[in-house]
Image (spheres, helix red, strand yellow):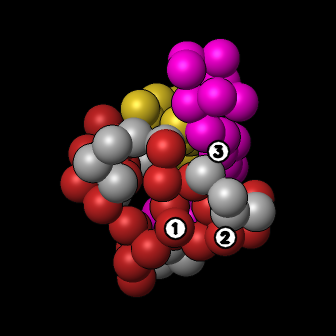
Amino acid sequence: MYSAEAIRELIQAGLPDANVEVMGDDGQHFAARVISASFSGKGIVEQHRMVYATLGERMGGEIHALSLKTMTPEQAGMA
């Protein structure tokens, strides 16, 4: 069973430039907001795949569901 903090750390390790927030307290269903310059020029599906790649085989296994909101720093108003 994973915690929101553990998932945040996994995403952060895979996307070191990202600002990551993860919510969820049942150990299986989570929501994440990921802001990364690495998303620049990429569509939403590709951005989500980048995040899922940081979690690997855990997705669909230990992590049952992850709702994502991804954006660049410019889109988030952080630039």
Secondary structure of the residue carrying tag 2 is: helix
Q: Earlier in the sequence, mark 3 or mark 1?
A: 1
Q: CA distance from mark 1 to mark 2?
A: 6 Å
Residue highlighted by disc 1 = 50
**Residue 70 numbered tag:** 3
Q: Residues within 10 Å of mark 2 (few under 14, many from 20)?
A: few
Q: CA distance from mark 3 to mark 1?
A: 10 Å
Q: Is residue 4 visible?
A: no
**Callout 3 touching callout 1 (CB < 8 Å):** yes
Q: In the image, what residue type sits under mark 1? A: Met
**Residue 46 numbered tag:** 2
Residue 27 location in percent, x, y?
43, 48
Residue 41 location in percent, x, y?
67, 58
The answer to which quarter of the image holds residue 13 is bottom left
- Residue at 39 percent across and 78 percent down: it is 56
**The magenta segment:** 63-79
